[in-house]
Amino acid sequence: MEVSLGQYFHAGGVSIWNQIPIMKGVGFASMIMIGLCNTYYIVIIAWTLYYLFSSLRVPLPWMTCDNEWNTISCWINNAMGNDPDDVEIPPTGSVSPAQEFWTHKALNISGDMAEIGQVQWHLFGTLILAWILVYLVIYKGIHQSGKIIWVMAMFPYVILTILFGYGLSLPGAFDGISFYITPQWHMLKEAKIWVAAGTQLLFTYGIGIGTNIALGSYNPTNHNFYR
């Protein structure tokens, strides 16, 4: 419905409400929501870029407790990667090196909310890089970005296929796959499962925030968007 409205009126998420002027505040509210979501997601992309660059180091910085940001609470499971039945019990209060990399290196979070902390320049750099990448994707308009989306849409499948193949080679892989594909039917009786699924569905499709209206506005009036 939203795509058809945008296509018919050739209007975006705000101007579409000119058809019902008293409701135009809905359009402005949706733009505020999109702005907040973009600000939220660009930070996640900045974290992702930082992890990508960190993953090029050998050894991986989150695999050992010998880094400057590690504390005495850092603990490595020496049984990991060996016999899956040989499990070490972590000491009380221990923290994995991966968690310490996240809290003490990547974020370098302060002690509490009363401490503002400092600018994390490594994340500031990846944040600027993330915005530059966004600009490069859209600066020539929606039609040019469509070609880039073809690449970006296929790339995750390539990576997931590689990770899946590597995961199969790890001990206990088939136990994990069995757990993943075995349905827990009793969970369907809980309302929170349906609420979470419905929320994710609406959020993923961008329903009600003007995204589909804006995308539809670029279509010719007689475009068969159903097909």
Image: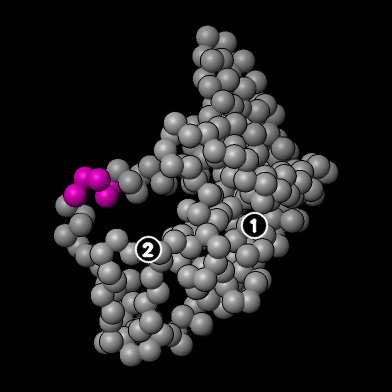
Decide: few, some or many residues near mark 2? Use Cα within 10 Å; few <14, some 14-19, many ≥20: some
Residue 39 figure quarter: top right
Which three-letter amino acid code belongs to the residue tagged 2? Ser
The residue nearer to you, when weighing 119 against 206, is: 119
Residue 17 figure quarter: top right
Report whether 71 appears left or right of 86. Answer: right
What numbered label is drawn on residue 120?
none
Question: Where is mark 1, residue-wise?
Answer: 49
Which span of residues is magenta-colored? 190-194
Report whether 58 appears left or right of 143. Answer: left
**In the image, farthest residue toward the top:** 22
Question: Where is mark 2, residue-wise?
Answer: 73
Report whether 210 appears left or right of 147. Answer: left
Q: Residue at x 53, y 76 (%)?
A: 163
Helix, strand or loop status at disc 2: loop
Residue 81 locus on image (x, y percent): 41, 85
The residue nearer to you, when weighing 129 against 117, is: 117
Which three-letter amino acid code belongs to the residue tagged 1? Leu
